[in-house]
Amino acid sequence: MAKKKNNRTLIIVLVVAAAALATLAYFKAKQKPRGEAVETEKVERRTIRETVSASGKVFPEKEVKISSDVSGEIVELFVEEGDSVKSGQVLARIDPDAYQSAVERGVASVNTSKSELSRSKAAVENTIAQLEQIKAQLDNARSIHQRNVKLREEGVISEQDFEASLTNVQQLEANKRAAEASKRSAEQSVESAKYNVKSSEASLKELRTNLSRTTITSPTDGVISMLGVEQGERVVGTIQMTGTEMMRIANFNSMEVQVEVSENDILRVSLGDTAEIEVDAYLEEKFLGVVTEIASSAMNTSGSGQVALTSDQVTNFVVKIRILPESYAHLVGNGSLIPFRPGMSAAVDINTNTVSNVLSIPIQAVTTREKDPKKGPGKEKSELDDDELREVVFEFTEADTARMVPVKTGIQDNEYIQVLSGLEGEETIVTGPYSAVSRKLESGMSLRKKEKREGEGTSD
């Protein structure tokens, strides 16, 4: 009997425990919050700055490459890398001996051509004198012949004497024509000699220019940013090709950042756009800049001007941004301190458009839905065309439900996007989580505001 009593007691305890667990589960289920947990934010008016981000390198805005125009050994080098130089300052000298000898030969050639010119002029004067003498003889012969014509008619002279005077006239006329031809030839020789003089003088000028090029001078004020030669080295230089690059002179008072901007963003960038610049060498420093140049051709354009026709390459355009000196004036100390050095890495945010006091919402609040979900079989978003989708946001209504609102958006920055139509302001919209906004939410769905953990702030 005792054993049966114990079994009955155990059964009663198990039944009571099961009933208690069922009651506890019922109350917990009743207290469980209903609806999708979401994050919300109110629609507000803000200033939105649309930017294009890019990265690149710092360069001097003006950097001159000094190359040799003549070949030879560097016999004197007057500068070192980092030296400041002035326009016209002598930087180096190349051995001038061979060029000095060439100048001396050129001087001799000029003197020879001038001597030839003098001889040609003397020949002209000689032919002129001969021509005048022949003219005088011809005039005298013609006078005698005219008298002989009358005397022949009167029968005073013989036929032989008459023919002799006529032959003398004809011979002198021929001599005159020959003398005139000799004069013209001598005059042409003078012209040729003049051209020879000019040619030799031009050659001498070129030789003297080559001699002067053995002295390398600075074409501008600046700093020697790169020195690629040493005294005693040989350099090569010709008129037909670029000579040995000896050094570079940069103006560090005017620096720029050269960045690569993709073809998707380049149309939004304009000359004069302002930019914020961050240089890796200066942590927590931001500098101001302005766009000064936008490349007309893509970087992957070949040297012949032909663009690669394949689409497997990223198409970028070079944009140059001048760093405004006033933005880094506090970094310039006494002496020749240079805040930026060529080749430093930099990142820029180019301000392409700014609108003020416009309705805006967080970017993550905007998603897309099908325009007509009942039309045809369902498709994944990746399979839908742009004209089959529309931009929407989900409003958190007073009834704790979601209301899908189609919107039209404008420009955006890193956090917010402009709303052109669809919202009036002061609405509370759903901003997260991303999985809910992008896929789960539909109109009429029950919602509840997500309770933020301690330290995350308060919920809307």
Image (cartoon, grey):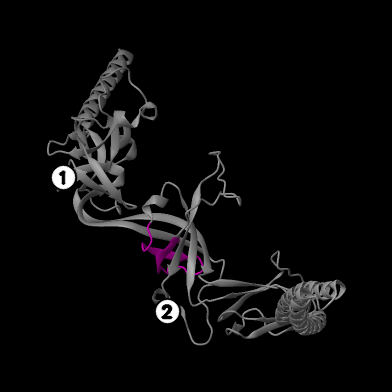
Quarter of image, res 439: top left
Q: Amino acid at mark 1?
A: Glu
Where disc 1 sits, the SS reads loop
Q: Position of residue 348 (x, y in %)?
A: 43, 60
Q: Amino acid at mark 2?
A: Ala
- Residue 427 is labelled as 1
Residue occupying image coordinates x 39% and y 29%: 382
Quarter of image, res 384: top left
Left or right: residue 6 compared with residue 181: left
Q: Nearer the viewer, residue 387 or 414?
A: 387
**Mark 1 or mark 2, which has the lower sequence index?**
2
| Disc 2: CA contacts within 10 A as few (<14), some (14-19) or many (>=20) | few
The boundaries of the magenta stretch are 270-293
Q: Nearer the viewer, residue 328 or 210?
A: 210
Q: Position of residue 367 (x, y in %)?
A: 29, 37
Q: Position of residue 61 (x, y in %)?
A: 50, 70
Residue 290 colored in magenta in the image: yes
Left or right: residue 426 compared with residue 145: left
Query: Residue tagged by mark 2?
Result: 329
